[in-house]
Image: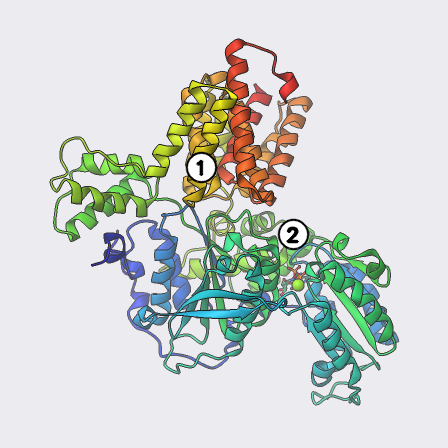
Amino acid sequence: MSFFKPQAQTPKAPPKHAVDPELQPWVEKYRPKTIDDVSAQEHTVAVLKKTLTSTNLPHMLFYGPPGTGKTSTILALARQLFGPENFRNRVLELNASDERGISIVREKIKNFARQTPRAQTVSSDGKEYPCPPYKIIILDEADSMTQDAQGALRRIMESYARITRFCLVCNYVTRIIEPLASRCSKFRFTSLDNQSSSSRLMHIATAEHIAVDPLVVETLISASSGDLRRAITYLQSASRLSSSTSPPTPITPRDVQEIAGVVPDDIINDFASVLGIDTDQAMSDTTPKPGFKGIRSAVKEIIREGYSASQVLSQLHDIVVLHPTLNAKQKSQCGLIFAEADKALCDGADEELWILEVGLHVSKAVS
Amino acid sequence: MSLWVDQYRPRALDDLHYHQGLSTCLKALAASGDFPHMLFYGPSGAGKKTRITCTLRQLFGPGVEKLKIDQRVFLTPSRRKVEVNLVQSNFHIEITPSEAGSYDRVVIQELLKEIAQTQQVDLNAKQRFKVVIINEADSLSRDAQAALRRTMEKYMSNMRIILCANSTSRLIAPIKSRCLLMRVAAPSREEMQSVMQYVSKRAGFDLPPEAGDKIIDDSGGNLRKAILVLEALKMQSPDLSGPLAIAKPDWETYCHKVADMIISEQSPARVMEVRQKLYELLSHCIPPTVILKTIAERVVDRVDEAIKTDIMHWAAIYEVRMRIGSKKIYHLEAWVVKVMSIYKHFFYDMDMSSFD
Ligand SMILES: Nc1ncnc2c1ncn2[C@@H]1O[C@H](COP(=O)(O)OP(=O)(O)OP(=O)(O)O)[C@@H](O)[C@H]1O
Ligand SMILES: [Mg+2]
């Protein structure tokens, strides 16, 4: 089918240059505009809403896994406090893409904190904003700041305490040094529960006029493990792909899995059975042991297909842990090797060697 | 005259031979106007780069093929200069940040901001955004990856990023959650056969299918390698009939020799000899992981089933240590000694527990 040419390609639309909201990625388009829009995270939202009325704000530390609304929440809060006009001169956002050596951070914050602009509480859009008398400095992705820079931040936070509030945002709270963390009120962002993810996804789907099956939503959620940004990206990609075929086809759970890089069930089940784990209860103890050679060629096949080792291992892990007939000892032996492999992969180890290592060990443990 | 791999490389999405599904996807994405950030991953020689280039052409037209190559010097905070090569057209720019070693973060920060803040200059451009291709994305340091995160969100309106990697395991979750993942699997045997037939036809000869099979066996799913071998063989014996001698690269033969040395004798003297050979390989810039894997593959093929698992286990362990540590040779050598000890103990059927 290499000469297959869909019609969509021949007439090229004239180039468009205007900023078209239609073409915005959905993650940006549906980024919460107010803190009420933020799904789940009830506790955080409730506390922050109080600060909107009291106009007093502590230093804050937001932490939690990717795509759970940390950046969105602080941006929405700042916008609601200051309104669109004052946002620029009242809010400074520094993230990992900015140079964040100690001296630079100090310089930037010093300059920023020095200017005291007058506040216009009524903005051009006619709304009134609380516009409290301080500035907000957002240090996004703060866990990638060096210890030294964090140390220096302590002094800075103190010396400008009267006129600035800091909001540190990070994934791993343990990477923030204790003296810094203890100066902030901490807000934990949890992975979104299925209910909130699903209602947010449905909301977006309705707004975009696309039909999604509940099964698809379920797949989106399980493939993105609580990361709403990922779920939204997958949804948009899937809908683009499905609407581009002629005639447009509905989105299937398999489409979503492919986009998400999930290894298809049959491939992972085949691999498991090569290792001697029966995924199909009907046929047990009939499969001959494939031995070293069999396992090695199964691993080579997976590598050829390009699946990522961490994905393969996490799916294999699910099969082992949830397996109905393996006993506790076997499962814990497998668990050890999965942990070992995860650490190795994080250290950048060779994927083929480690899938093989896990395969050989699991096969030994379950035999 | 360029090599066949380049000369007959498909240039448009429609010309790509296999993974039709992917090509259709890419075409749809390119037409939709809201092209996402993308991450292409898959084994080497599977055609990731070709696919990316074709996608660019689909996005911007033939203008992307007018390339110029520049060198840029970046200044690190500690006032060191790092040089990086940039390949660019009017519409895109391609970088390999790993050239800058541990300073890749500086390259990412400076270059991307600069690109992000300049609008597309060419008013006739089909797209409002520029594309940044980042090669070897899986070797980006953590810091460099962190630097990409907000950049990818903030400057979405005039920049798209295409990451190209062998695997996604080394990329941090926040990056993966910002990209559309595109898996490019190695082509199947049939697909490789048909590509080679096509290349042969274009080059003006018929490839006997058996010869094709032979080359595929040798290539391990790497299409680039297969086509290179095809061209080399054609040079050697123009009619491509009879038994084909596919020359193994020298380093591979050398690794096999090392494996044989390990199996034939286990002694301190032999360790010294092996070390000489390992040094030799390292000094020829063969990546240590490749050395270890090639030797291990050969060793396990030649030993008893009972100790294969153990040998691979230690290969896996020493390979990670090698990555974390700084002296590659220590770990290679340690593994060699380990293998010798396993082998010898197995032979004399002794208790190995004190060596674990
Ligand atoms: N709780 C939420 N409610 C509504 N939308 C959300 C929520 N969490 C994430 N999103 C969606 O995901 C996108 C990314 O969220 P955000 O940038 O806030 O994540 P983050 O927590 O800062 O992630 P990271 O740790 O990767 O920086 C938002 O644009 C929004 O569309
Ligand atoms: Mg964020």
B79 vs A323, nearest the viewer: B79
Residue B66 image position (x, y, % from top left): 31, 71
The quarter of the picture showing ligand 2: bottom right
Q: Is residue A52 visible?
A: yes
Q: Residue at x 26, y 51 (%)?
A: A1
**Does ligand 1 reach within 8 Å of label 2's beta carbon?**
no
Residue A348 image position (x, y, % from top left): 56, 45
Q: Which residue is mark 1?
A: B291
Residue A34 image position (x, y, % from top left): 71, 72
Q: Is residue B213 above or below residue A47?
A: above
Give, as a three-letter code, the residue at label 2: Gly
A202 vs B132, nearest the viewer: B132
Q: Which residue is mark 2?
A: A226
A92 vs A195, nearest the viewer: A92
**Does ligand 1 reach within 8 Å of label 1's beta carbon?**
no
Give, as a three-letter code, the residue at label 1: Ile
Q: Residues within 10 Å of mark 1 (few under 14, many from 20)?
A: many
Q: Residues within 10 Å of mark 2 (few under 14, many from 20)?
A: many
Instruction: Give the chain of mark 1.
Output: B
Residue B243 in the figure: left or right of residue B280: left
Q: Residue at x 70, y 56 (%)?
A: A171
State which quarter of the image contains the C terminus of chain B: top right
